[in-house]
Amino acid sequence: MSEKHIPSKYVKTAKESGFLAHIAYDSVIFGFDGSTLKILISGYSNTKLFALPGGFVKENESLDDAVRRGLYDRTGLENIYLEQFHTFGSLERYIPATIEKIMLSNGHLKAGENHWLLERFISVGYYALINFNEVKPKPDELSDSCEWYPINELPPLMLDHHEMVQKALETLRGNINKKLVGANLLPEKFTMKQYQQVYEAILGENIRRTTFQRQILGLEILKRHEKQFLGKSHKAPFLYSFIK
Amino acid sequence: MSEKHIPSKYVKTAKESGFLAHIAYDSVIFGFDGSTLKILISGYSNTKLFALPGGFVKENESLDDAVRRGLYDRTGLENIYLEQFHTFGSLERYIPATIEKIMLSNGHLKAGENHWLLERFISVGYYALINFNEVKPKPDELSDSCEWYPINELPPLMLDHHEMVQKALETLRGNINKKLVGANLLPEKFTMKQYQQVYEAILGENIRRTTFQRQILGLEILKRHEKQFLGKSHKAPFLYSFIK
DNA sequence: AATCTATTGTCTCAATTTGTGACAATATTA
DNA sequence: TAATATTGTCACAAATTGAGACAATAGATT
């Protein structure tokens, strides 16, 4: 559920630490490596547990800002494209033993001790779209890894994090034609083929090339550049960028 | 933000009352009266404040169940169609003076006293679709009214509740062709015209009659009944119901 | 330098869906 | 009995999508 912004070892209540009790967020951070859609997953040292990068909300910061802060700490990026997709509040997701295991193995908790992180949390799910190549993800205090995984080769995730990924993906699919998804996953300039591959990776199905081109160009959201992409042994495709 | 399930007068902390601190929900309850889309709004005695019906989550109930409990108390209905649409966590929505005013005017608070309801809340927005004619909404302890208002004739609402209504409506519009919206807003049997009016009320625009019929019937989700709707001086329309 | 290969940009035509109007059918009112 | 308003259905035009064809061309091969 969390790894970053853990309060110091001997703070026991949320209030003492400056965070809001019972509220967490988890983020599904999508990146596109040119052919596959991937997401960032944190691993916890000494346990075999994996989780979505998450965190908590400070008393004097907005929910959105809390998520941005967490993303900045892990990726160094500001102005990330963020979309909230669902809030998870079932009773089944309250398994304090899992959090306890992580905190014990990291020395953030002594056996038998109480801690506000062991209380029940309702978690708000966000997804982010980032440019895969601009980022070297950083692990943090509690986790010892933060790595890209293809969306259909994820390790077993703790709690309801698989459900979160599924719901994030469904939302992203529903938004693919409403929001400029490609603008956030692709580099500044890209070929029509690359853009089509983003669609295919997100939707998980093949798209007809000619129909796709006709429809995308019909939206008039792309600027065509003179410079072309060279290097392959076939006709060079145009490069495009998003208008504005 | 809330009117129902207020803990007794002298309980000061969320924990003492059995609720989760900092977490609320607000519900946009849609009903269709035959021509207009309406929502339920609570009014608070002695103040001129209006709000969406909302409440809090008990320590041992899920978020969804908390919302269902609140809906049951106000409408008497079970198995209501519910959809979560957004979670609101800005700093601007934290205005304890507003809640204080309501609680003072209802005797739930003494001047200068602390109370967990005066702390900051993050609120999860849900919308519900209910059959307008089956319900006589009930006000509760803190509010003195709970009434239907047409969506474009709402009274001024407290905090960010107008934004909530707007977002609920946008989500409903986006879902209109994905989920069986009509099945929850219409009576068991209805005419094609009534169904069209639901669409027009939600979308806020006129729909072409022939195209609408062709598309809806093409979905094969409706059963046509022999019995026809009589009483008007023109050809009697068929009655339909949703399959299964 | 000529040819081959893989992919691109564009076009065409068929198939499908949607927009638009027309018209006969009919339950009630006049 | 005729008039009125709305319904169910059809017909045709317009727009969109599906499916394939084909010339153009950057680099690889010879």
Image (cartoon, coloured by chain):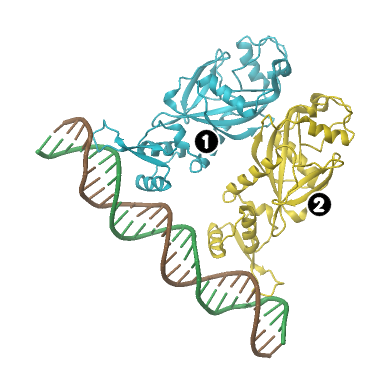
Chain colours: A yellow, B cyan, C brown, D green
Disc 1 packing (10 Å; few <14; some 14–19; many ≥20): some
Percent x, y of residue A172: 62, 47
- Position of A117 relative to A46 (above/below): above
The disc at residue A136 is: 2
- Position of A244 relative to A118 (above/below): below
Disc 2 packing (10 Å; few <14; some 14–19; many ≥20): few
Q: Nearer the viewer, residue B207 or A119?
A: A119
Residue B159 seen in this snapshot: no
The disc at residue B169 is: 1
The disc at residue B101 is: none
In which quadrant is the C terminus of chain B drawn?
A: top left
- Please name the residue shown 55% across and 13% down the image: B45
The answer to whether mark 1 and mark 2 are in CB contact below 8 A is: no
Percent x, y of residue B197: 39, 37
Which subunit holds the residue at mark 2?
A: A
In which quadrant is the N terminus of chain B drawn?
A: top right
Q: Which of the 4 image quarters holds residue D3?
A: top left
* Callout 1 amino acid: Leu
Residue A55 seen in this snapshot: yes
